[in-house]
Image (tube, helix red, strand yellow):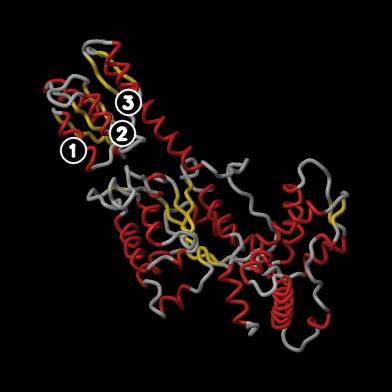
Amino acid sequence: MSKGTILVVEDKESMRRMLFETLRNEGYEVEACSRGEEGVRLLKSKAFDLLLTDLKLPGMDGVSVLREGRKADPMLPAIVMTAYGSIESAVAAMKEGAFDYIQKPFDTDHLLLLIERAMSQKKMERENLLLKGEKEEKEGRPEIIGRSAVIEEIKKMAQKVAKSEVTVLLLGESGSGKEVFAHYIHGTSPRSAQAFVAINCAAIPRELLENELFGSEKGAYTGSTGRKIGKFELADKGTVFLDEIGDMDLSLQAKMLRVLQERTIERLGGTQTIPVDVRVITASNQNLEKKVKEKQFREDLFYRLSVFPITIPPLRERKQDIPLLAEHFLGRASPTGPKRLDTETLNLLTEYPWPGNVRELENAIERAVILAEGDEIKKEHFGIPEVEPRTLVEEGSLREVRIKAMEEAEKRVILKALAEAKGNKSEAARMLKVSYRILLDKIKGYGLE
């Protein structure tokens, strides 16, 4: 496996040949040229992991090559070589963003050490970019909370598939914990030390989503002033998690299929094919098979994504996990002082159908901690209705009774939220902690128009 791609710009043929052979023998992919103008052309047409350039070149000098290279890729590390040891030239190169400089003649071991350090810095900058604005888990992998038989079985499936490279499709209602399981699969895989990049396909418009996924070259669209590195490149050697893949535009699905088949991408506005080594995990709260039949989702992409499908059950179908989850979220929401749930409240939480699933439970706990003045949290701090006994004594199988009770409870909660929001569906969705689309589906499904 290649250690990275390096562009060498050196006008002396003997030095250029020596650098080419040395770096290639060390496991790097190397391209070399003798003039600065040719170096800039290569930097604009292809992605490199490092630039190694002489300062004194015929025509365009090394500082100019470095300046243009950094315009194309602001994260490009560069090492400059000089035969003169001039402080002025070294300072000029460092001001343009050079990682370091080395004076000729030099020891190749020293050069290789500088290259390794520069590559490490690029990797660190890439990881910092990925982590910006995100909260990292204190543990190496997220914890799956639950002891129900179905969750234990899913954990075993996740652990098994994590060891392979196959694409995983996580299915389940909104808020059921699909991203947590995606993190879990990544964290138990051989790629766990590399980047985990998540992107919500439903939250970004189609024209912007392609740019986010694959990146773009300077001038690819109005306002594009430089090269943008996409999520697939940033996640190289790691994992990409595509949430709500069912909302991806059909034209973009075709490009995604090519990425999965060929393991290459092309930036918007670019012509260079860029290899990427990523594990892909996708998730959806929709019935993708139905969307395939309705021609709203590509059949070939569906089969490529669903090599190993895992369905996460809704919280109402694993009620024995609710007390554990409640205690877990309670500990996170009140780290500075003791807070506890009384028995009546815990029973209420266990019987409530939780239309927003685990995410809704977590938000409800956080809100209750704020409202509770003492150490004990009571049911009035949650503001959720109790399930009336009459909904539990209908005729039918246990499953039918459970579904009936859940539906009746959901109807009452939705109507209550709509009444409090004075018919404003966006506000009601915010109160219920579900997406606007999910609320509309519920209203239509229950005939509450």
Disc 2 marks a residue whose amino acid type is Arg
Q: Could you tell me how far apart the alpha carbons at marks 3 and 1 are, in whole angstroms?
A: 18 Å
108 sits to left or right of 344: left
- Dividing the picture into quadrants, the one containing residue 150 is bottom right
**Which is more N-terminal, label 3 or label 2?**
2
Q: What x and y, as percent, mark residue 208?
A: 39, 57
Q: What separation in Å lies between label 2 and label 3 (alpha carbons)?
A: 8 Å
Looking at marks 3 and 1 on the same chain, the residue that comes earlier in the sequence is marked by 1
> For the residue marked with disc 3, what is the amino acid?
Glu
Q: Are marks 2 and 3 in contact (CB under 8 Å)?
A: yes
Q: Residue at x 65, y 83 (%)?
A: 448
Q: What amino acid is found at the position of numbered circle 1 in the picture?
A: Arg
Of marks 3 and 1, the one in the foreground: 3
**Label 2 crowd (10 A; few <14 / some 14-19 / many >=20):** many
Q: On the picture, is 226 further left or further right than 373?
A: left
| Residue to which mark 2 is pinned | 70
Residue 115 seen anywhere in this rendered image of the structure: no
Q: Secondary structure at mark 3?
A: loop
Dividing the picture into quadrants, the one containing residue 5 is: top left
Q: CA distance from mark 1 to mark 2?
A: 13 Å
Q: Residue at x 52, y 53 (%)?
A: 185
Q: Are marks 3 and 1 in contact (CB under 8 Å)?
A: no
